[in-house]
C-alpha cells in the first residue's frame, strides 16, 4: 500500500516536471522569435545619412575648387584650396587683402548661397567650416559656425574632412560639419 | 471513468495552449508586417533618391561634362555645346538636366550664346511639364578665362539638377 502511494506521488512529480519543461520550451521559442523580429525592426538602413555625407563631400570639394578674386601673383587667381596654403604662409593678394581674409569672406558667401544656410524652414540645423594646421594644431581662420550645435541632438550629423598641402611638411585639414533635421 | 475525464481535460488544456500560442504568433506577425508595410513606401522613396543622387554624380563625372584637372568639375563650355540635345535623354534615361549657378550671383537668365557667361542657368534638356527635382548635387562649374594675357581655370559653384519621371536606371 505504501509502495503504491509512493509510486503515485512520483508519477505526479514527473507530470509536473514535464509541464514545466513544456512551458519553458514555449517561453524560449517566443523569446527567440521576439529577438529575431526586434533585430529586423532595429536594422534601419542608413541610406539617408550616407547620402547626406556624399552631398556634403561634393559641396566641400566644390568650395575648394572655387576660384576667388585673390591673385598671387597678379593674373593668377587662386582657388580656395590654394588660398588655404597661402593663408598658412601669411601671403597677401594682389589687391592688398590678406589671403585669410578673402578665404573667410568667400566661404561665408558660398554657404549663404547654398542649401546649407541655417534659417527658418531649412533642414540644416548647424553648419561649420574650420581649417587647421597639422603642425601647430591651430585654426587658420576663425571657424565659420552657423546655427547652434546643441540643437542637433536628435539630428543626422555628418562630417567631411579633407587634408590639403599647407606648404613644406605641413598639412592643413579642411573640415566641414553639418547637422540636419532627422 | 475518472481517468478518461482527466485525459480529456489534459487534451483540452493542450488544445487551448496550442491555440493561444498560435494566436500569439499570428498577432506578433501581423504587428511586424503592419510596421514594415508602413515604412516600405518611405524606404522606396529613399532608395529612389539614392539612385538619383548616384546618377547625378555619374553624369557630372562623365567625359561629356567633366572639366579636366578639377575633381567633379563640370565644363561650362561643353554644357553650352550640348544644350538642347534631347538624344541625351535616352542615353541617360532621365527627363532633364539643368545646371544652375549658385555663387557668385549672376542675372537670373537662362544661358544663350548671346548672354554667356553672364547667365544663371544652362538647360541641357528639360521637360517643361515636369517640375519635380529628382536629385541634385553641388559641382564646380569651370571654364577657361583670360587674365592679363594668361589663361586660367575659372570655377564657380553650381548645382546639377536631374529630372526624372520614371524610375531612374
Image: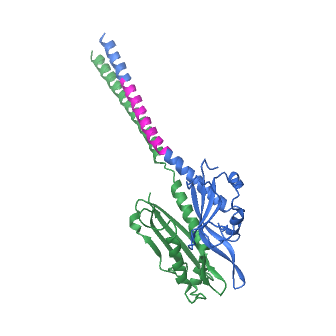
Chain colours: A green, B blue
Note whether B21 is above or below B93 in the view shown: above
x 40%, y 62%: residue:
A153
Judged by its main secondary structure, the magenta piece is: helix
Q: Number of marks in the image?
A: 0
Q: Quadrant of the N terminus of chain B?
A: top left
Of all residues, the one furthest to the top in this rendering is B1
- Decide if residue A168 is on the left or right side of residue A100: right
Question: Closer to the camera, A75 or A59?
Answer: A75
Note whether B29 is above or below B111 in the view shown: above
Indicate the quadrant where residue A87 lies.
bottom right
> Residue B72: x, y in percent?
64, 66
Q: Is residue B26 visible?
A: yes
Q: Is residue A165 visible?
A: no
- Decide if residue A93 is on the left or right side of residue B1: right
Tell me if residue B20 is in the magenta stretch. Answer: yes
Of all residues, the one furthest to the bottom in this rendering is A96
Tell me if residue B19 is in the magenta stretch. Answer: yes
Indicate the quadrant where residue B5 lies.
top left
> Residue A37: x, y in percent?
46, 41
> Residue A138: x, y in percent?
50, 80
> Residue A175: x, y in percent?
53, 71
Q: Which residues are magenta?
A: B16-40
Question: Closer to the camera, B89 or B37?
Answer: B89
Amino acid at each position: 500500500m505504501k509502495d503504491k502511494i509512493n509510486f503515485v506521488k512520483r508519477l505526479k512529480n514527473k507530470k509536473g516536471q514535464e509541464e514545466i519543461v513544456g512551458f519553458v520550451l514555449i517561453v524560449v521559442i517566443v523569446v527567440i522569435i521576439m529577438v529575431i523580429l526586434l533585430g529586423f525592426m532595429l536594422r534601419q538602413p542608413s541610406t539617408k545619412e550616407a547620402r547626406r555625407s556624399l552631398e556634403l563631400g561634393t559641396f566641400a570639394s566644390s568650395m575648394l575648387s572655387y576660384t576667388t578674386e585673390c591673385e598671387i601673383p597678379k593674373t593668377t587667381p587662386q582657388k580656395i584650396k590654394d588660398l588655404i596654403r597661402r593663408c598658412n604662409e601669411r601671403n597677401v593678394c594682389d589687391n592688398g587683402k590678406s589671403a585669410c581674409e578673402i578665404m573667410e569672406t568667400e566661404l561665408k558667401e558660398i554657404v549663404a548661397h547654398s542649401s546649407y544656410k541655417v534659417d527658418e524652414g531649412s533642414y540644416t540645423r548647424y553648419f561649420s567650416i574650420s581649417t587647421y594646421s597639422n603642425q601647430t594644431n591651430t585654426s587658420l581662420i576663425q571657424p565659420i559656425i552657423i546655427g547652434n550645435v546643441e540643437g542637433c541632438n536628435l539630428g543626422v550629423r555628418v562630417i567631411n574632412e579633407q587634408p590639403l598641402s599647407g606648404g613644406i611638411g605641413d598639412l592643413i585639414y579642411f573640415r566641414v560639419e553639418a547637422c540636419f533635421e532627422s | 471513468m475518472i481517468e478518461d475525464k482527466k485525459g480529456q481535460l489534459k487534451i483540452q488544456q493542450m488544445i487551448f495552449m496550442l491555440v493561444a500560442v498560435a494566436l500569439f504568433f499570428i498577432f506578433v506577425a501581423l504587428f511586424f508586417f503592419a510596421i514594415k508595410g508602413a515604412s516600405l513606401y518611405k524606404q522606396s522613396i529613399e532608395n529612389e533618391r539614392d539612385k538619383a543622387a548616384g546618377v547625378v554624380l555619374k553624369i557630372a563625372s562623365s567625359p561629356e561634362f567633366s572639366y579636366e584637372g578639377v575633381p567633379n568639375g563640370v565644363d561650362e563650355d561643353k554644357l553650352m555645346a550640348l544644350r538642347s540635345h534631347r538624344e541625351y535623354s535616352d542615353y541617360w534615361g532621365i527627363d532633364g538636366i539643368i545646371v544652375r549657378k549658385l555663387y557668385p550671383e549672376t542675372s537670373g537668365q537662362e544661358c544663350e550664346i548671346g548672354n554667356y557667361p553672364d547667365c544663371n542657368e544652362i538647360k541641357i534638356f528639360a521637360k517643361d511639364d515636369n517640375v519635380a527635382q529628382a536629385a541634385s548635387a553641388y559641382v564646380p562649374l569651370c571654364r577657361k578665362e583670360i587674365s592679363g594675357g594668361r589663361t586660367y581655370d575659372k570655377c564657380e559653384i553650381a548645382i546639377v539638377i536631374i529630372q526624372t519621371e520614371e524610375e531612374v536606371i
